[in-house]
Image (cartoon, grey):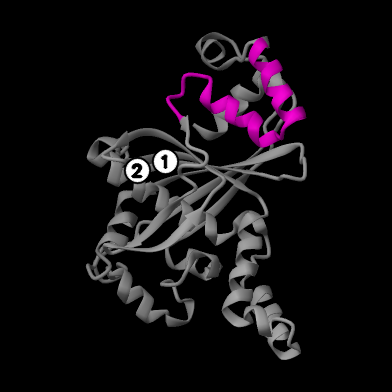
């Protein structure tokens, strides 16, 4: 591409000023697909993997990932007795992945703009790879599938109505109108996921420094979204957040080339438990 046709470099603040209606500088629960477009982020969906294919692997891949019967029974018991969410905690914390569950200690990550923390993005759990100076290096986040929508409604309800006015007909109409406008048509493409990935990458960079940066100049992060309604599958989101995108958030006044990213979503079935480890690791790590 020649210099005459090249897209000019813009700072993040300049992008915000040029597209003021998109209001990138708001809480991620209020983001819409337009924010994803401004950051050149796209969702890519993949067909459900084949459990049969996963169980027929051979060689080193099978030796590394195949779950033994004892763990399969443990996973099945956790899924049947507690919930499926507990089941895949077993998958990631018992197979030598180096991940540690911090449920109850780290319930989310901060999204930073410049040097300020502008939003706290909540999760059900964060699986981390290491600690450094009391900082976490999140690798896998766990979130209920319906959580972003529920939290979005609660935030809008509080910001517009409050306890006293939420049942007032005009106020109630405004609340419902804004909820409809900010609710994504496809919940699998919730912009909240993009904000979460950026925040996770920022936390990894703060904890690990240059040593955590991949050879391709990106920060790999994963999200598992589970339906608490006993759905027979889980959604696994993966992304490699470019260092250039983090630099735009770190230096919002500096003109930098916009580096887009893709978020990949794979549907992984729980059954059969014997192949769950192989299939989850294949999709998530």
Quadrant location of residue 226? Answer: top right
> Which mark is on residue 138?
1
Residue 103 visible from this viewpoint: yes
Q: Secondary structure at mark 2?
A: helix
* Any part of residue 198 in sight: no
- Image coords of residue 220 (percent x, y): 41, 40
Is 102 situated left or right of 246 in this image?
Answer: right
Q: Which residue is mark 2?
A: 204
Up the image or down, 42 lies above or below 66; here it is below
Q: Which mark is residue 93?
A: none
Viewer-side residue, 236 vs 113 = 113
Q: Is residue 86 magenta?
A: yes
Give the percent coordinates (x, y) of residue 253.
Answer: 24, 71
Marks 2/1 in contact by CB < 8 Å: the verdict is yes
262 in relation to 4, above or below: above
Q: Which residues are magenta?
A: 70-99
16 up-or-down from 276: above or below:
below
Give me the C-alpha separation between circle 2 and circle 1: 6 Å
Ranked by sequence position, the earlier of labels 2 and 1 is: 1
Q: Label 1: few (<14), some or many (≥20) within 10 Å? A: many
Instruction: Tell me, yes or no, whether the highlighted magenta stretch contains residue 181.
Output: no
Query: From the viewer's perspective, is 6 left or right of 175?
Result: left
Q: Where is residue 12 drawn, in percent x and y?
A: 32, 69
Q: Secondary structure at mark 1?
A: strand
């Amino acid at each position: 591409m020649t210099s005459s046709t090249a897209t000019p470099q813009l700072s993040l603040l300049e992008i915000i000023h040029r597209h003021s209606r998109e209001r990138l500088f708001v809480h991620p629960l209020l983001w819409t697909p337009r924010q994803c477009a401004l950051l050149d982020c796209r969702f890519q969906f993949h067909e459900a993997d084949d459990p049969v294919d996963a169980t027929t692997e051979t060689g080193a891949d099978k030796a590394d990932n195949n779950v033994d019967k004892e763990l399969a029974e443990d996973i099945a018991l956790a899924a049947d007795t507690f919930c499926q969410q507990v089941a895949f905690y077993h998958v990631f914390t018992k197979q030598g992945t180096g991940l540690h569950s911090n449920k109850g200690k780290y319930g989310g990550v901060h999204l930073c703009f410049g040097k300020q923390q502008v939003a706290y993005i909540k999760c059900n759990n964060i699986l981390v790879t290491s600690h450094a100076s009391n900082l976490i290096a999140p690798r896998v986040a766990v979130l209920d599938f319906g959580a972003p929508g529920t939290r979005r409604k609660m935030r809008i309800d509080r910001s517009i109505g409050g306890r006293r006015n939420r049942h007032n007909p005009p106020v109630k109409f405004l609340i419902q109108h804004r909820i409809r406008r900010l609710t994504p048509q496809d919940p699998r493409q919730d912009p909240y996921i993009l904000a979460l990935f950026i925040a996770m990458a920022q936390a990894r960079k703060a904890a690990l420094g240059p040593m955590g940066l991949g050879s391709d100049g990106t920060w790999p992060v994963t999200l598992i979204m589970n339906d608490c309604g006993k759905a027979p599958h889980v959604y696994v989101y993966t992304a490699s957040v470019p260092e250039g995108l983090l630099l735009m958030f770190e230096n919002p006044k500096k003109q930098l080339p916009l580096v887009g990213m893709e978020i990949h979503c794979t549907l992984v079935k729980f059954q059969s438990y014997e192949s769950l480890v192989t299939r989850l690791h294949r999709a998530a790590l």
